[in-house]
Amino acid sequence: MSEKPKNDLLGIRYLSAEQIQALYQLADRFWEVLQQPTRKVAALTGSTVALLFFESSTRTKLSFELAAKRLGADVLNFSATGSSLDKGETLLDTALNILAMGVDAFVVRHRGVGSAHFLAKHLPVPVINAGDGTHEHPTQALLDTYTLYRHFGRLEGLTLTIIGDLFHSRVALSHLHIAPKVGLSLRLCAPPSLIPALWYQLGYPIYTEVVPAVAGADAVLVLRMQKERQSYPPIASWQEYSRFYQLKPEHLRPGQVLLHPGPINWGVELHPALQAWPHTRILDQVTHGVAIRMAVLYWLLRG
Ligand code: NCD
């Protein structure tokens, strides 16, 4: 088990601007490692990382797994289906039992807001929040901004527009916290029913129409409708959502970078013709996610 003082990554809100820059620099180093033929370093040999995913995931789970393995760590994969949760075991008991097997860090995704914070309070090893309900998804905001940083060579002074389900998105909330720390100007765009009332007081420009929200922005991050958390369509119907809020090729100008955290619902939030947009960086986000998660794991376990 780790003998280092315990450190967690629960949200961007707890990171300083300096820590974020340090994580980008570590990611740069690991990016270089990933370009080598072996794509591996022995930085976390002897450590074990447990992935506790209580919600569906493709990118986040696999990229944490790959990041840990590229650093030489062992990975313990837990998935809620088929576990003793069916028999009434609690979240904490589940984690404590996995800890008893000899685990040095936990990566947790759970639909409960604050679930990673709860586990962090009770576990003696680092906990990484891989998405807690509608709250935060810190590594996604780190990899999105890292992708922009690698593309533009800087973040300071860039304008990023986020369009989509702001209300239910943990990605959006993590971006609200990261933007001022890295010097990004943020614009937010959604139907009024998907803009949390308190966000009007934060000082970010808020738009309810796509055209002015996107005009002149350096990059656009489009979010999926988080239907699993919505009790009714955000505007009269899904068809109307796509008609008024779908990003279409005619909204973009050459050079404007397109981002999406995935999974994408083509034809809902993104027009299918944008699959051919030359300035898309959506798969780069996935690639960079491995380097960012290597940086986070290394920082928490050895930093
Ligand atoms: C995001 C998530 O899970 O919050 N996806 C991801 O981590 N790649 C966004 C989403 O599910 O829409």
Image: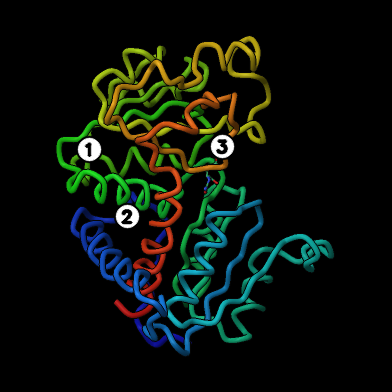
Q: Which residue is mark 1?
A: 184
Q: Residue at x 41, y 80 (%)?
A: 38
* Mark 1: few/some/many CA within 10 Å (<14, 14-19, 20+): some
Q: Amino acid at mark 2?
A: Tyr
Q: Amino acid at mark 3?
A: Ile
Q: Which residue is mark 3?
A: 264
**Sequence-wise first label, 1 or 2:** 2
Give the vertical position of 215 relative to 295 (above or below).
above
Q: Residue at x 39, y 25 (%)?
A: 198
Report the number of numbered marks.
3
The label nearer to you, 3 versus 1, is 3
Q: Amino acid at mark 1?
A: Leu
Residue 83 position within the rendered picture, expressed as x and y whole percent measured from the top left: 78, 67
Q: Is residue 95 toward the left or the right of residue 279 in the image? A: right
> In the rendered image, which quarter contains the C terminus?
bottom left
* Mark 2: few/some/many CA within 10 Å (<14, 14-19, 20+): few
Question: Which secondary structure, mark 2?
Answer: helix
**Sequence-wise first label, 3 or 1:** 1
Residue 239, image quadrant:
top right
**Sequence-wise first label, 3 or 2:** 2
Q: Is 292 in front, or is 136?
A: 292
Q: Is residue 94 toward the left or the right of residue 173 in the image? A: right
Q: Residue at x 39, y 77 (%)?
A: 37
Question: Which secondary structure, mark 1?
Answer: loop
Give the vertical position of 81 relative to 94 (above or below).
above
Q: Which residue is mark 2?
A: 14
Calculate the distance from the C-alpha at mark 3 to the C-alpha at mark 1: 24 Å
Specify the color scheme: rainbow
Residue 217, image quadrant:
top left
Calculate the distance from the C-alpha at mark 1 to the C-alpha at mark 2: 18 Å
Label 3 close to label 1 by CB (< 8 Å): no
Label 1 close to label 2 by CB (< 8 Å): no
